[in-house]
Image (tube, grey):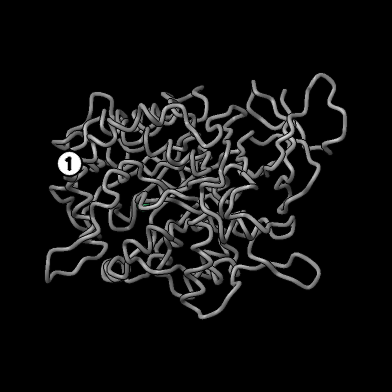
Amino acid sequence: MRALAADLTYVEDRFQSDVAVVFDEQDGRIDRVQPAARPTPGIEVERCSGCALVPGLVNAHSHAFQRAIRGRTQWRPLGEHADFWSWREAMYRAVLRLSPDDMYELARFCFIEMLLAGYTTVGEFHYVQRDERGAEYANPNELALQLIRAAQEVGIRIALLNVCYATGGVGEALREEQRRFGTPDLDRYLSHTEQLRSQVQGKPLVSVGLAPHSLRAVPSDWLAPIASHAREHDLPLHMHVAEQPAEVDACMRAYGRRPGELLADRGLLDARFTAVHATHLNTGEILALGQAGITVCACPTTERDLGDGIPSARELVDAGARLCIGSDSQTVIDPWEEMRSIEYHTRLATLRRVILAEEVGHGRSEVGPLLFRAGGANGAGSLKVDAGVIAPGKQADFVLIDLDHPSLAGWTQATLAAHLALCAPAAVVRDVWVAGRIRVQEGQHPALKAARPAFDAVCQRVLP
Ligand SMILES: [Zn+2]
């Protein structure tokens, strides 16, 4: 057992002083949370002065390989316009050049960057599954296993969301450049996922979920069987939903219903379901998704990069949805920036301030608690991992914050949540624990230096 006592610890939705967190390094879980002064026989309480302890942040939506194209798509041919769809063409070009080793190298570096920023769990939405020619690998889960190997190597918790991708657009055949995504049929998708679950059984820090890619990529009659498989095996169920207006229009043309209506019809909407983006829902869809108790994964740094739009965050929360965050295309890897951007983008869209606020007593409402839940607990719930909060029995995934960092100067116990969620850079992260083991110490990850040259080489090759 170990015990950490920082100056402040984020417990029960607020920063509290004089708290010791006692955790078991063997089973990786928090044993108890108690007053720092209470004796802990046989355990020396380690004082972390000048620091605050917060739950590890959860990245509920990632495509690790897309880290390779960061900074390489920020241009357009003279006289042409650029948008989500033209970005997608560049991403497809990169995909066609990735070997299994490249996948591993990109993910290894990307996952280290996540740990350095304070993410302790990643939900990897994995859709590049076949080889360069579009054929199945000898082990159909070859690339999923490369991603899992990378996560294990660097010490981040991973929920591998195994993707089903069968059509090139709503009701259209898969395109040639999408050949590496192709799921041949529903039975094989589910059996490969089950095979993957048995291949990772017993591996620490690894779990598996289901992810029909989007209504663009999955025939609507596959959705109900996928949802019932998720229920039967108690797996998370994630899907890109209404990311672009063109996708909503295609859904209307093909099915005569909006995406939220179709998902409700097919029985996908319940507390297990996470809608990624949800940027183009109408009021009726927002109410239906909220009432079903789903989670919406906002990826604001990607949504602004790709010109996706801004989700109606306040309306979704009021309707009953939970918000979580994802780094998605890896344009930015910074959980604090994702958390605050949900709030700040909504301010730009509504010309108001302090939107995602909830009552904290003394006649005030604040945004810190909701943003912290979006960064931690809600993402953990969405991925069905037992983390995201500092509480007995939960995974010992924490982040130690350097309170002496210049960006935090002026903090108080009452303002620290707002300082972190709305103002500070990821450079405030000092140490990171996953499952009770330290993975980042004094801002350093031991594998970063070794991972960099191979990562740089892959970036240069896949999208020169
Ligand atoms: Zn995505």
| Quadrant occupied by the N terminus | top right
Of 50 and 117, nearer the camera is: 50
Quick one: SS at disc 1?
Answer: loop
Residue 262 point in image, percent of width and height: 39, 63
Q: Is residue 67 visible?
A: yes
Residue 57 point in image, percent of width and height: 55, 45
Up the image or down, 75 lies above or below 438; here it is: below
Residue at the extreme right: 38
User: In the image, what residue occupies the spot 62% across and 38% down?
Assistant: 398
Q: Give the amino acid type for the residue marked by disc 1 in the picture.
A: Leu
264 horizontally vs 2: left or right:
left
Q: Is residue 229 visible?
A: no
Residue 252 point in image, percent of width and height: 31, 71
| Quadrant occupied by the C terminus | top left
- Counting the numbered discs, the total is 1
Up the image or down, 84 lies above or below 213; here it is: below
Return the residue at label 1: 96
Up the image or down, 296 lies above or below 448; here it is: below
Of 77 and 296, nearer the camera is: 77
Of 416 and 95, nearer the camera is: 416
User: In the image, what residue occupies the spot 53% across and 45% down?
Assistant: 58
Residue 38 point in image, percent of width and height: 87, 33
Mark 1 Cα-neighbour bin, 10 Å: few <14, some 14–19, many ≥20: some
User: In the image, what residue occupies the spot 41% across and 66% down?
Assistant: 279
134 horizontally vs 314: left or right:
left
Where, by quadrant of the figure, is residue 391 drawn? top right
Asked if disc 1 is less than 8 Å from ligand 1, the answer is: no
